[in-house]
Image (cartoon, rainbow, N blue to C red):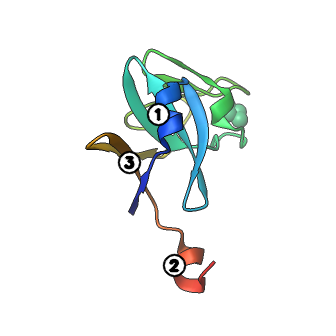
């Protein structure tokens, strides 16, 4: 895992869901009920872009078939039998950082 600084314009915009890239990997940055969350960007059900969804009561709702995922644990609602990955966010001084998995292609192959 590797920490990446979240662009300040993304933080300042406070958009509910943004699709961002860190180390070549897409993730969703979410601002919900005055807290920040970060999750994987692809829905495990059929691959929709979760950045097109919405948040309700601590859940991220997929725009395609409305599967919902807990913003903290990533766990899908009962009966879905799926989950999304959630990433840690940490504030350091005036910046926010997200912890993403290390890009193995970059690490071992240099691209
Ligand atoms: S693609 Fe997300 S619920 Fe079907």
User: Is residue 69 at least partly visible in the picture?
Assistant: no
Q: Earlier in the sequence, mark 1 or mark 2?
A: 1
Query: Going 44% across and 15% down the picture, which residue do you hit?
Result: 57
Q: Is residue 98 above or below residue 54?
A: below
User: Is residue 16 at least partly visible in the picture?
Assistant: yes
Query: Going 57% across and 29% down the picture, which residue do you hit?
Result: 17
Q: What is the quadrant of residue 43 in the picture?
A: top right
Q: Earlier in the sequence, mark 3 or mark 2?
A: 3
Residue 73 or 91: which is nearer the viewer?
A: 91
Q: Quarter containing ligand 1?
A: top right
Residue 100 or 84: which is nearer the viewer?
A: 100
Pointer 2 residue: 107
Q: Secondary structure at mark 1?
A: helix
Q: Earlier in the sequence, mark 1 or mark 3?
A: 1
Q: What is the quadrant of residue 20 in the picture?
A: top right
Residue 52 rendering spot, x and y as whole percentages: 68, 29
Outermost bottom residue = 109
Pointer 3 residue: 97
Residue 19 rendering spot, x and y as whole percentages: 62, 39
Residue 91 or 46: which is nearer the viewer?
A: 91
Residue 93 or 66: which is nearer the viewer?
A: 93
């Amino acid at each position: 895992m590797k920490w990446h600084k979240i662009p300040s314009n993304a933080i300042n915009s406070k958009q509910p869901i943004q699709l961002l890239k860190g180390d070549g990997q897409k993730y969703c940055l979410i601002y919900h009920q005055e807290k920040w969350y970060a999750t994987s960007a692809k829905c495990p059900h059929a691959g929709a872009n979760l950045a097109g969804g919405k948040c309700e009561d601590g859940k991220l709702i997929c725009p395609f078939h409305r599967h919902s995922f807990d913003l903290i644990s990533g766990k899908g609602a009962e009966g879905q039998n799926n989950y999304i990955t959630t990433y840690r966010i940490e504030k350091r001084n005036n910046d926010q950082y997200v912890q993403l998995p290390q890009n193995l292609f970059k690490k071992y192959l240099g691209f």
